[in-house]
Image (cartoon, rainbow, N blue to C red):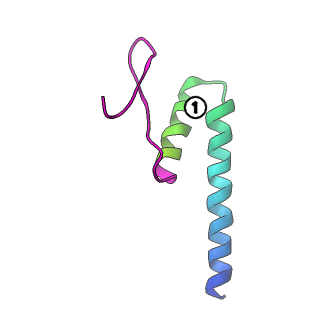
Amino acid sequence: MTIGLISAIAAVFYGSTVSILALTATFARRRTMRREARSTLAVLVPGRAVESQQVDGTAVSPSS
Protein backbone atom coordinates (compact mmCIF):
# COMPACT_ATOMS: atom_id res chain seq x y z
CA MET A 1 0.00 0.00 0.00
CA THR A 2 1.23 3.44 -0.75
CA ILE A 3 1.33 6.24 1.78
CA GLY A 4 -1.13 8.22 -0.37
CA LEU A 5 -3.76 5.51 -0.12
CA ILE A 6 -3.33 5.21 3.63
CA SER A 7 -3.57 9.00 3.97
CA ALA A 8 -6.73 9.07 1.86
CA ILE A 9 -8.36 6.35 3.95
CA ALA A 10 -7.43 8.17 7.16
CA ALA A 11 -8.82 11.46 5.81
CA VAL A 12 -12.13 9.84 4.84
CA PHE A 13 -12.38 8.12 8.22
CA TYR A 14 -11.61 11.36 10.09
CA GLY A 15 -14.05 13.37 7.97
CA SER A 16 -16.86 10.89 8.41
CA THR A 17 -16.26 10.71 12.17
CA VAL A 18 -16.37 14.49 12.52
CA SER A 19 -19.48 14.68 10.32
CA ILE A 20 -21.35 12.07 12.37
CA LEU A 21 -20.38 13.81 15.60
CA ALA A 22 -21.50 17.19 14.25
CA LEU A 23 -24.87 15.75 13.25
CA THR A 24 -25.22 14.08 16.64
CA ALA A 25 -24.28 17.31 18.44
CA THR A 26 -26.96 19.14 16.48
CA PHE A 27 -29.86 16.70 16.20
CA ALA A 28 -29.61 14.27 19.14
CA ARG A 29 -32.76 14.09 21.23
CA ARG A 30 -31.02 13.73 24.57
CA ARG A 31 -29.10 16.65 26.02
CA THR A 32 -26.36 14.38 27.37
CA MET A 33 -25.76 12.88 23.93
CA ARG A 34 -25.43 16.36 22.40
CA ARG A 35 -23.04 17.43 25.16
CA GLU A 36 -20.84 14.34 24.74
CA ALA A 37 -20.73 14.81 20.96
CA ARG A 38 -19.71 18.45 21.38
CA SER A 39 -16.94 17.59 23.81
CA THR A 40 -15.63 14.89 21.47
CA LEU A 41 -15.71 17.37 18.58
CA ALA A 42 -13.70 19.80 20.68
CA VAL A 43 -11.00 17.15 21.02
CA LEU A 44 -10.96 16.22 17.33
CA VAL A 45 -11.21 19.71 15.81
CA PRO A 46 -8.33 21.98 16.82
CA GLY A 47 -9.16 25.51 17.94
CA ARG A 48 -12.70 24.68 18.98
CA ALA A 49 -13.44 25.73 22.58
CA VAL A 50 -15.83 23.82 24.81
CA GLU A 51 -18.40 25.88 26.67
CA SER A 52 -19.20 24.60 30.13
CA GLN A 53 -22.71 24.88 31.50
CA GLN A 54 -23.66 26.36 34.84
CA VAL A 55 -26.47 24.99 36.98
CA ASP A 56 -28.96 27.55 35.62
CA GLY A 57 -28.15 26.50 32.04
CA THR A 58 -26.29 29.60 30.86
CA ALA A 59 -23.13 29.07 28.88
CA VAL A 60 -19.82 30.23 30.28
CA SER A 61 -16.68 30.62 28.22
CA PRO A 62 -13.63 28.66 29.41
CA SER A 63 -11.71 31.87 30.15
CA SER A 64 -14.27 33.02 32.78
- Tell me residue 39's x, y (percent): 48, 40
- Tell me residue 11's x, y (percent): 64, 67
Q: Residue furthest left?
A: 64
Main SS, magenta region, reads loop
Q: Quadrant of the N terminus?
A: bottom right
Q: How many marks overall?
A: 1
- Side of 59 where 20 appears, left or right: right
- Side of 60 where 21 appears, left or right: right
**Could you tell me which residue is drawn at 44 percent across and 17 percent down?**
58
Residue 45 belongs to the span the image colors magenta? yes
Start-end of magenta stretch: 43-64
Crowdedness near tag 1: few (<14), some (14–19) or many (≥20) residues, C-alpha within 10 Å: some
Residue type at mark 1 is: Arg
Q: Is residue 27 above or below residue 17?
A: above
Q: Which residue is mark 1?
A: 34
**Could you tell me which residue is drawn at 30 percent across and 28 percent down?**
64
- Side of 61 where 31 appears, left or right: right
Q: Name the residue nearer the viewer: 16 or 45.
A: 45
Q: Which image quarter: residue 4? A: bottom right
Provide the secondary structure element on which disc 1 rests. helix
- Tell me residue 5's x, y (percent): 68, 80
Q: Name the residue nearer the viewer: 54 or 37.
A: 54
Residue 51 belongs to the span the image colors magenta? yes
**Could you tell me which residue is drawn at 69 percent across and 31 percent down?**
27
Q: Is residue 8 above or below residue 62?
A: below
Q: Residue furthest top?
A: 56
Q: Is residue 9 above or below residue 22?
A: below
